[in-house]
Amino acid sequence: MPQIDQPLHDGPKHVAVIMDGNGRWAQKRGRPRLFGHHAGARRVREIVRACPDEGVKYLTIFAFSTENWKRTQTEVAGLMALFRRYIQREAMALLDEGVRVRFIGDRIKLDDKLVSLMDNLELLTSNNDKVHLTIALNYGSRDEVTRAAQRLAVEIEQGRLSHKDVDAETLSRFLDTRFLPDPDLVIRTSGEARISNFLLWQSAYAEYEFIDTLWPDFTKDVFAKVLAGYGKRERRFGAVIA
Ligand code: FPP
């Protein structure tokens, strides 16, 4: 019979995060929204570094959605510049720390310079295996599933696949996330309880944590607490069914 004070199993291996609240964090300080995004980028660094100690092998973060293009041109351009800068500044540290970086989302709308930095970082870190950091950039689940369905249709049209072969496992192999296990836990910061088109297919069995902290205030201690909460919930569930 499971012990109440002993976790039934390890913490989440794959954590996905909707990093929300940068704009509000900046506004509360009377600063432009981009100031919040820069503070948010520093937290990304801290949380990635905390993953090995927390037993998190896969971290997937929502950096820019297919809907985020609707923001002002200044904010979009500022975010794109921030992503370029983050990749340039962090590449060597990520390599040294054993982080394998990959990107999901449609690259077609991203500028060439950013795409080449993304490609280079993926290649540079491709032999790392300590932490798998996946950055969702111009990502939306519906867009991802639509693109997967289009690629699947081409395979059928060209006779490499029969419609009878199409099941959930086959479709998963056409998604941007084909190299990732499904998330165990999805965290959204800033008090909003929405999924916002993030990993809808992949999170079918995930647990969700909606927490009030704004992303720039999401320290590694807050992260550790949220992960510990996941363990507790599992423990209670185990005790009830035991
Ligand atoms: C949501 O907050 C945040 C974003 C759309 C951008 C996320 C980007 C970062 C955390 C920057 C760094 C990322 C990387 C990968 C270096 P919001 O602007 O919607 O906040 P609000 O809801 O308070 O307006």
Image (cartoon, helix red, strand yellow):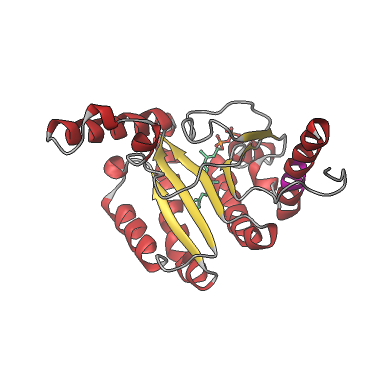
Residue 78 can be seen in this image: no
Residue placed most toward the observer, 99 or 191: 99
Is 81 in front, or is 222? 222
Numbered marks: total: 0
Compare residues 165 and 70 and report the one nearer the observer: 165
| Magenta span of residues | 225-229
> Image check: 80 left or right of 200?
left
Picture layout, residue 196 above or below residue 35 = above
Q: Quadrant of residue 194?
A: top right
In this rendering, does residue 4 appear at all? yes
- Outermost residue, front direction? 1
Taking the spot 69% from the left edge, 49% from the top edge, the residue there is 11
**Ligand 1 shows up in which quadrant of the image?**
top right
Q: Is residue 145 magenta?
A: no
Residue 115 picture location, percent across and down: 31, 53
Q: Quadrant of the C terminus?
A: top right
Q: Where is residue 222 drawn, in percent x and y?
A: 74, 48
- Left or right: residue 128 versus residue 115 is right
Q: Residue at x 26, y 52 (%)?
A: 112
| Residue 52 sits above or below residue 223 on the image | below
Relative vertical location of residue 170 with respect to residue 120 in this rendering, above or below: above
Instruction: Tell me where residue 60 appears, x and y as whole percent.
Output: 52, 47
- Asked where in the image residue 138 lies, by quadrant, the reply is top left
Q: Residue furthest left?
A: 158
**Quadrant of the snapshot with the N terminus:** top right
Measuring from the top left, give residue 177's x and y in whole percent. 41, 44
Q: Nearer the viewer, residue 87 or 158?
A: 158
| Residue 209 placement: quadrant | top right
Q: Main secondary structure of the magenta part?
A: helix
Residue under the point 42% across and 54% down: 102
Is residue 122 left or right of 54 when viewed as pictured?
left
